[in-house]
Image (spheres, rainbow, N blue to C red):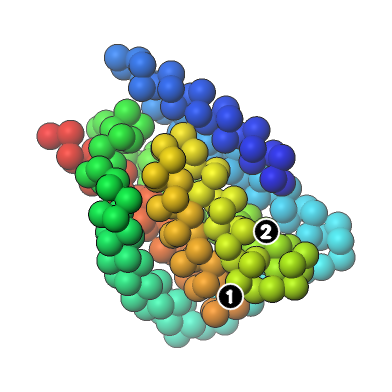
Amino acid sequence: MLAGFAGWTFGAKILADQMRAASNPNRVRVYLITIFVEWFFFVLVVAGVRRSGASVLLVLGDHWHSARQVLRDIGIAAGFWVVALALLWTFGRLLRVGAPGRNMQFIFPHGPAEVALWIALSVTAGICEETIFRGYLQRQFMALTKSAPAGILLSAAAFGAAHAYQGFRMVILIGLFGAMLGILAYWRGSVRPGMIVHAWQDSLGGVVGSLMRH
């Protein structure tokens, strides 16, 4: 998994550099490639877990059994997002990260069709990346180190590194966000609230970034 993500990170950096240099980059192509890669790794995790004889619920957490449980996780996700946003804004100022999304304008959607595809990409990232990094890798790192804090930090470091195409300072900030999501998943015993937060954050970031062009 780590080797695969290292390869994808290298490829994403090449794609990002090409898009930055292009006057009219093909964002739809990149969105579709990214969606495919994310689901490929998701399927790889699920297949590996099942092959070991374990239940997929080991990485996802228990099923929702009622509307009340769904609403509870949505509420947890909303509260977490507000706190995380405040902390990320503070850390962003300390790291002297520029205006949100300023270095990512090349990838943000243009027009309704691209916005719709961006939201699909964001939902994909929320489901797949939380399953991979918090549901699978975090548990693996915890088992290897026999330490929950170490597992959370190692998974967060891998999560940040996977976004290296955004620049070094953003890698640190995204790694911090990954650590927060890791704490949430460990406390909740499920990646579902993190999936909601992750999908919402990415969707909102792309839409706001697109509006900032105007």
**Along the line of sight, which residue is nearer the eye, 23 or 177?**
177
* 14, above or below 80, in the image: above
At mark 2, the secondary structure is helix
Which amino acid type is shown beneath numbered disc 1?
Tyr
Q: Which mark is residue 212?
A: none
Q: Are marks 2 and 1 in contact (CB under 8 Å)?
A: no
Pinpoint residue 173: horizontal percent, then vertical percent: 40, 53
Number of the label disc, if any, that sits on residue 186: 1
**Left or right of residue 89: residue 45:** right
Q: Is residue 28 above or below residue 137?
A: above
Q: Which residue is mark 2?
A: 137
x 27%, y 47%: residue: 96
Mark closer to the chain start, 2 or 1 = 2
Residue 33: x and y in percent read: 54, 31
**Image vertical order of residue 148 relative to residue 46, above or below:** below
Q: Position of residue 80 (x, y in %)?
A: 38, 73
- Check the picture and name the quadrant holding the C terminus: top left
Q: Residue at (41%, 77%) from the top-left corner?
A: 76
Can I make out residue 44 in this image? Answer: yes
Instruction: Look at 18% across and 40% down and name the residue there.
Output: 211
The residue under label 2 is which amino acid type?
Leu
* Residue at position x 61%, y 45% in the image: 39
Report the side of 189 relative to 26 (left or right). Answer: right
Give me the C-alpha separation between circle 2 and circle 1: 12 Å
- On the image, the x and y values in percent for residue 186 come to 58, 75
Crowd band around label 1 with a 10 angstrom C-alpha radius: few (<14), some (14–19), many (20+): some
198 over 73 or under it: above or below: above
Q: In this orientation, does residue 128 appear?
A: no
Dot 1: what SS?
Answer: helix
